[in-house]
Image (spheres, helix red, strand yellow):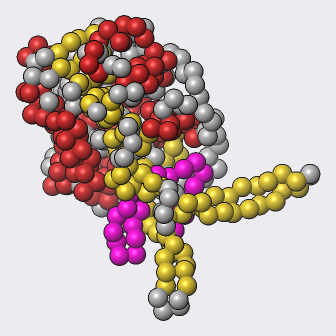
Amino acid sequence: MAIVSFLFGSGFSIPEGLPGVRQLNQRMGKIDESEILIHTDQHAMFLNGQDDPNRWSRWDERQFLQEFLEFYNNDVLKDDQEFHYETFYDFYSGYLREKENKDLIEGFYKAFNDKHFKGKDGQRDCYNRVSDFNRSFNQLLGSQLHSLKYFEDVSTLNYPPYDSFWSLLRELLKVNDLKVHTLNHDLFFDWIGRHHSDLWQEFSDGFELEGSPFYGTVSYDFPHGDKKVHKTYKVKLERFTDKFDTKLCLYKLHGSVFNTVIYRQNHERVRIKSNYAVRDYHEEVFNEEKKKFEFQHLWDDVSPDFLSGTTEKTKRYIEDDHYIKLFKHFESNLKESSLLIVVGYGFQDPGINDYLINNFLEAGKKMIVIDPYKPKSDILDKYNCDYVAQGVTKIPYQDYLKLIPKELLK
């Protein structure tokens, strides 16, 4: 059975109504402290009509977030440069990693302290201030890629305007294994893979519920006449097992807005797939001394588990065991694939491009690039590539079939 690989960039999700890079840059490049809330549990969010009764709480973190962005835009970017959230991430994460841009960032930190604390901020040094900023900024960025409908446990058959593309997947699945790799953090294709009636039975993403010892807590007030009954339950959560054993596999190469890193008692890091309204993570373990099972409370990273930064994320490709595993799959899938279909990716990630060239394109195999705007990359001209100047939702089903070599169709 042949293998067909896909690579999705942000352009794949734009017709779904999710923001692309340009929209994210506009939203994240300027944030006023009055627009956001940073809760005492360290979760940050954009206010959308809600009241914040504790505006005094973490006011300094909100103010630092606003002024750090203003400093970067006004004092760091050159006149001909525009804000890009990934380049900005490289700027400050380099400081957290190796004290890069030390003079600039610590100079801003001193000015911030002089302005708001008369030079004496005894609570947070510069490193911790920027760490707090990073946590909140990533949460706010991730919130732009959320949609409540992706938490709905409902099945779907017709999902316009993508129906012709889903039909292509269904047709290819008859005689091929499909390896879908995405650079997107959103939950769109995750939800489709798990809920589309033609796809769900073939879908896997490396996470498994069966046998998982990990749980989260959900609380709910059930209405009962004019009263309410408050209940709290533990719900089992999927954990990453690196098992991709179906015909339609999804590999989220840059992580996801709803993957969570938790820490076992021995400090081992585990990735779980959280769920709607879940909090307080636990692991069910057997206590040898007491000869019984018990729940152990687990700490978690409050920031979502996704990669950002034009250069910072490429370092994680080879440093983080989770992403090392995913990129090994990416490499082997490309080598074994007969066809590569790229949707909505601008070929601006040097690390990803190297994988494409070294493991697929240099072998002379065919790549189809679907994007209404031709990517500014010589890769399309140097290798065996068919460029389709249309969006993923604008191509009729019959035209999709014409793009596919006959030997890959039943």
Give the farthest residue toward the right: 225
Give the farthest residue toward the bottom: 289
In percent of the image, x 61 and y 46: which residue is there?
A: 52
Residue 166 falls in image quadrant: top left
Q: Quadrant of the C terminus?
A: top left
In percent of the image, x 9 and y 22: which residue is there?
A: 364
Magenta highlight on residue 116? no
In percent of the image, x 11 and y 29: which residue is there?
A: 357
Residue 66 falls in image quadrant: top left
Residue 137 makes an appearance in the image: no
Magenta highlight on residue 278? yes
Along the viewing direction, whichever of 164 and 369 lies nearer the viewer:
164
Along the viewing direction, whichever of 309 and 327 lies nearer the viewer:
327
Where 45 falls versus 399 (above or below)? below
Is 138 left or right of 95, judged from the image as shown?
A: right
Is 97 left or right of 224, judged from the image as shown?
A: left
Residue 185 makes an appearance in the image: yes
Q: Position of residue 318 (x, y in %)?
A: 17, 51
Along the viewing direction, whichever of 86 and 217 lies nearer the viewer:
217
Q: Position of residue 97 (x, y in %)?
A: 19, 55
In percent of the image, x 54 and y 63: which residue is there?
A: 215
How many numbered marks have been drawn onto this rendered protein structure?
0
Where 199 falls versus 278 (above or below)? above
Which region of the structure is painted magenta?
Answer: 260-282
Residue 47 falls in image quadrant: top right
Q: Position of residue 219 (x, y in %)?
A: 68, 58
Q: Quadrant of the N terminus?
A: top left
Where 60 falls versus 363 (above or below)? below
Q: Position of residue 246 (x, y in %)?
A: 39, 42
